């Protein structure tokens, strides 16, 4: 069994990006600029945005964070999004989710200019991904593909079982894995809360992508010997022994499943660091402006 080290891979990728940015700047161009919109005071969102700002520093990017009170109206938020759409000094931006209940996330995401949608959440980018056209790919799924690629994991003709059907992970990773590409070319089954015989389906999987947000859901008796296990779960579970008062827990019972797997991602240090890396890659692509010119 080999542990897939997302932390180290992310470090390598950030170094590669930083080298490319240094060349860009040496040739007289400005570095990429990522902006983040943060609404309210959600602890998780604050941490995510702080990590994105830190990754920008590591890559030599400029970054800015626009903070708004949880009471901001949907129209006010959309006006700020339009401002970023039109700002020539911002290459890409994200609106950190979740948003307060009174704001319609779909309307907010559709207000983002898809040329600057480095999260890959806009329906145009989702549609382009689903038919294999260039566009911004959602960060977590493209981070998973990058890990499979860098670890030379053979995916052609394999049965990939995706647990979870979210717009951010489950649906786009299913699309990417079924694409005629390398990594890709899988036979994909997507399981969700209404799936019957889930254990039997998992036992047929060569690759399991666990993205259902249910701590330690995937047990050893659901895994075929030699399967590749990708754990996307990051649930905060209360833990009084930690200074933070919680620990991040994946969707896989790591200790027991690892014994049966050929490759497995840990939590933390697996998929998580790769997600931010993909966002950095998308921002660099946005800066270069070549993605939609064909
Ligand atoms: N909330 C949880 N994950 C994400 C993400 O990847 N992007 C944004 N914008 N919000 C999130």
Image: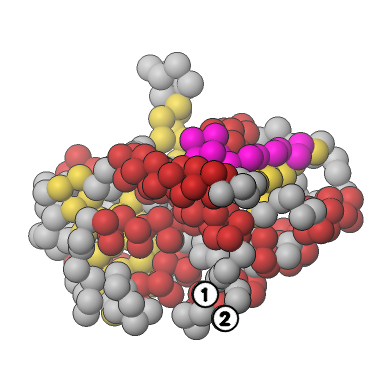
| Drawn side of residue 237 relative to residue 177, left or right | right
Q: Which residue is mark 2?
A: 294
**What's the residue at 39%, 47% (across, down)?**
16
- SS at badge 2: loop
Residue 105 is one of the magenta-drawn residues: no
Instruction: Count residues near mark 2 (Cα–Cα under 10 Å), then give few for <14, some for 14-19, many for 20+.
Output: few
Please tell me which of labels 2 and 1 falls first in the chain.
1
Residue range of the region highlighted in magenta in the rendering: 56-67
**What's the residue at 34%, 82% (across, down)?**
180
**What's the residue at 78%, 59% (across, down)?**
85
| Drawn side of residue 270 relative to residue 34, left or right | left
Mark 2 CB within 8 Å of ligand 1:
no
User: Is mark 2 in CB contact (under 8 Å) with mark 1?
Assistant: yes
- SS at badge 1: loop
Disc sitting over residue 134 in the figure: 1
Residue found at the very far front of the displayed protein: 27
Measured in 3D between alpha carbons, the distance from the residue under mark 2 to the one under mark 1, in whole angstroms, is 9 Å
Q: Please, which colouring scheme is shown?
A: secondary structure
Dividing the picture into quadrants, the one containing residue 157 is bottom left
Report the number of numbered marks.
2
Q: Quadrant of the C terminus?
A: bottom right
Q: Can the viewer see residue 196? A: no
| Drawn side of residue 124 relative to residue 52, left or right | right
Instruction: Count residues near mark 1 (Cα–Cα under 10 Å), then give few for <14, some for 14-19, many for 20+.
Output: some
Q: Please tell me which residue lies in front, 185 or 210.
A: 185
- Percent coordinates x, y for residue 259 in the rendering: 11, 47
Residue 58 is one of the magenta-drawn residues: yes
Mark 1 CB within 8 Å of ligand 1:
no
């Amino acid at each position: 069994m080999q542990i897939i080290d997302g932390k180290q891979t992310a470090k390598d990728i950030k170094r590669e990006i930083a080298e490319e940015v240094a060349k860009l700047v040496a040739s007289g161009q400005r570095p990429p600029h990522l902006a983040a919109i943060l609404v309210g005071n959600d602890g998780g969102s604050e941490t995510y945005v702080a990590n994105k700002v830190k990754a920008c520093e590591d890559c030599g990017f400029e970054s800015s964070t626009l903070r708004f009170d949880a009471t901001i109206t949907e129209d006010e938020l959309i006006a700020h999004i339009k401002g970023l759409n039109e700002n020539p000094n911002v290459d890409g931006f994200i609106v950190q989710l979740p948003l307060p209940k009174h704001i319609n996330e779909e309307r907010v995401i559709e207000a983002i200019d898809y040329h600057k949608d480095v999260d890959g959440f806009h329906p145009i980018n989702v549609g382009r991904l689903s038919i294999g056209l260039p566009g911004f790919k959602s960060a977590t799924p493209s981070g998973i593909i990058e890990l499979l690629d860098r670890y030379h994991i053979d995916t052609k003709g394999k049965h990939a079982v995706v647990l979870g059907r979210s717009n951010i992970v489950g649906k786009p990773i299913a699309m990417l894995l079924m694409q005629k590409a390398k990594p890709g070319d899988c036979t994909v089954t997507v399981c969700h809360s209404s799936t019957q015989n889930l254990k039997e389906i998992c036992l047929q999987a060569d690759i399991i992508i666990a993205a259902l947000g249910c701590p330690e859901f995937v047990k050893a008796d659901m895994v075929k010997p030699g399967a590749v296990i990708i754990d996307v779960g990051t649930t905060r579970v209360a833990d009084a022994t930690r200074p933070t008062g919680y620990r991040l827990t994946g969707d896989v019972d790591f200790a027991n499943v690892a014994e049966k797997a050929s490759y497995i991602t840990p939590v933390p240090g697996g998929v998580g660091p790769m997600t931010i890396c993909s966002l950095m890659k998308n921002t660099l692509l946005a800066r270069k402006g070549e993605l939609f010119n064909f």
